[in-house]
Amino acid sequence: MTGEPMNDDDRIAYLAGEPTGSIDDMDARADLDELRALLADPGLWDEPAPTLEDAVVSAVARAAATPPVRTIAPAPPAAATTVRTSEAVAPVISIDRHRRWTRTVSLLGAAAAVIAVVATMVVVTGRQDDSESFSMTLEPTEEVPAAQGSATLTKTDSGWRIELDATGLPRRDEGRFYQAWLRNEDGTLVPIGTFNEGADVVLWAGVSPLDFSTLTVTEEAADDGDQASSGIRVLAGTISPTDE
Amino acid sequence: MTADDIDGFRRGDADAVRQVYREYGRLVYAVARNMLASKELAEEATQQTFVKAWQAATSFDSTRALGPWLTTIARRTCIDLHRREVRRSAVNLDDVTAAHPSLVTAGPDMDQGYDAWAVRQAIDDLPDDERAVVRLQHVEGLSHVEIAAQLGVPIGTVKSRSFRAHRRLAAALGHLREPDREHDRERDHQPARTFDPPNPEPSPDERRTLG
C-alpha cells in the first residue's frame, strides 16, 4: 500500500523540503528522500582539481606510449611465480592488443625467455667494475597509472646513494607511506627507505644494485604490524649502466 | 562529442582526450567522489577511469552514448579502489572492535554511480543563480531567509529560484525512479564489451614476495 500517487507540485515541493501536506505515496517519498540525500552530499558538488585534466591526459598518453610487453626483469623465484597480474604487466594494454598478445603468448613466452637471458647477459657482461653510477626509469603500475619516475644510483664509501624523483604519486601520510626496495634475481627484497612524497627522495642501500638490480616502490601502512612488503607496487624499474 | 573526437580518443590523441575529459571529467569525478567519499581517491579513480576507457575504446560502439559507458567503467574502478583501500587498512581480527568501519561500512553501491552521475549532470544544467540556491539549501542546510541574507536578494527571489530549480531537478531526475530503469540500464549503460576485471588480488603469501 503506497497511497495516492504524488502529483508534480507535491513532488517539487517535497524535493525542495517545503510543506506538502499529507503525502501517502510512500514509495515516491522514499525516492525523493534519496534524491535529497544526494543533493545534500557535498562531494557531489565538489569540483575536481584543475590539475586533474592534465593528469588524465598525461596518464592516457603514457598508457598509449607503453609497449604491451612485460618489462624485462629478473625472473621471480619459484615461490613467487604466481605474480599479481596488475603488478607484473606493463601498466596499460588495450584490450584488443592484449588479446592479440594473448594469442601469441606461447611464441612470446619463448622469445621473452630468450630476451630475458640475453638482457641479463648484457647487464652482467656490460657491467664495468669501475662503474660508479647507474640510472633507471621507473614505470607505473595499475595501482597508480599516472606515476612515473627515475632514479640514479651512485656508489659512495657509505653505500649506494639512490636519488629517486617521481611524479604522479599522491602524498601518503598519517600512517601510510611509500617504501622503496631493491630486489635480486632470487626475489630477495632489501628495504632502502620510506617516504611520503616522490619528489627528490634520497635513499641508501647497503647492497649493490649490480646484484639487486630491480628497484620497486610499494605503498605501506605503519599500523599493520607487518615489516614485509605489502605487494602494492606503484613503481618499478631495472638498472642500466649510465654513460660516464 | 563528435565521431572524430571518439576516434581521436581511441588513438590516445591528447586533444581528443582533453575534449572527452572536458565533456565528462566532472561527471566521472562526481561518481567517484560520491562512491569513494575521498577527494584524493576520486581523482585517482578519475585518472584510472580514463586510462581504462582508452584501453577499451577500440571496442566502444560509437553509436551509443559515451557517458553511460564511462559511468560503468568509473563505477567498476571505484569498487576496485574501494577493495584496495579495505585491503590496505586490514587489521588483525583480534584487534577489530564491533564498530570498526570494515565491519559496519558497506562498500560502494553500484547504483550510486548512476544516480550520482545523473544528479551531478542535473546540477550542472541549472542556471548559476538557481544552482547557488539549491546548494545553500541542501548542502548548507540554510532556510530561505538565511539564503536571502547570504545572497543579498529578496526572499521572494530565493523562493522563486528554489521553485524553478527544483522543478528542473524533478523533471531531470524523475527517470531515476521509474520502474523500468533497471532494464534501461542493462540496455543502455553496459559497455559495448566488458573487459577483464583489473587488479586481481594477491593471496597473502603472494603479497609477501611482491615488493
Image (cartoon, rainbow, N blue to C red):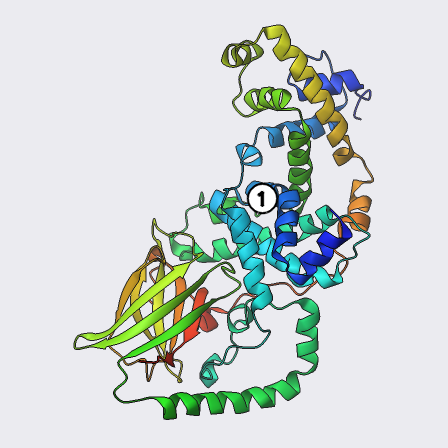
Q: Residue at x 46, y 88 (%)?
A: A119
Residue type at tag 1: Tyr
Q: Residue at x 27, y 89 (%)?
A: A129
Q: Which of these two is toward me, A225 or B75?
A: B75
Image coordinates of residue B140 in percent, x first then y, are 52, 22
Q: In this picture, is B144 found above or below A174? A: above
Q: The N terminus of chain A appears in which quarter of the rendering?
A: top right
Q: The C terminus of chain A appears in which quarter of the rendering?
A: bottom left
Q: Residue at x 64, y 18 (%)?
A: A17
Question: Farthest front residue?
Answer: A244
Q: In this picture, is A92 found above or below B36? A: below
A226 left or right of B119? left
Q: In this picture, is A223 found above or below A64? A: above
Q: Which of these two is toward me, A244 or B7?
A: A244
Image coordinates of residue A180 in percent, x first then y, are 35, 67
Residue A195 appears in the figure? yes
Which residue is identified by label 1? B29
Residue B57: name its quadrant.
bottom right
Q: Residue at x 80, y 21 (%)?
A: A3
Q: Which of these two is toward me, B205 or A178?
A: A178
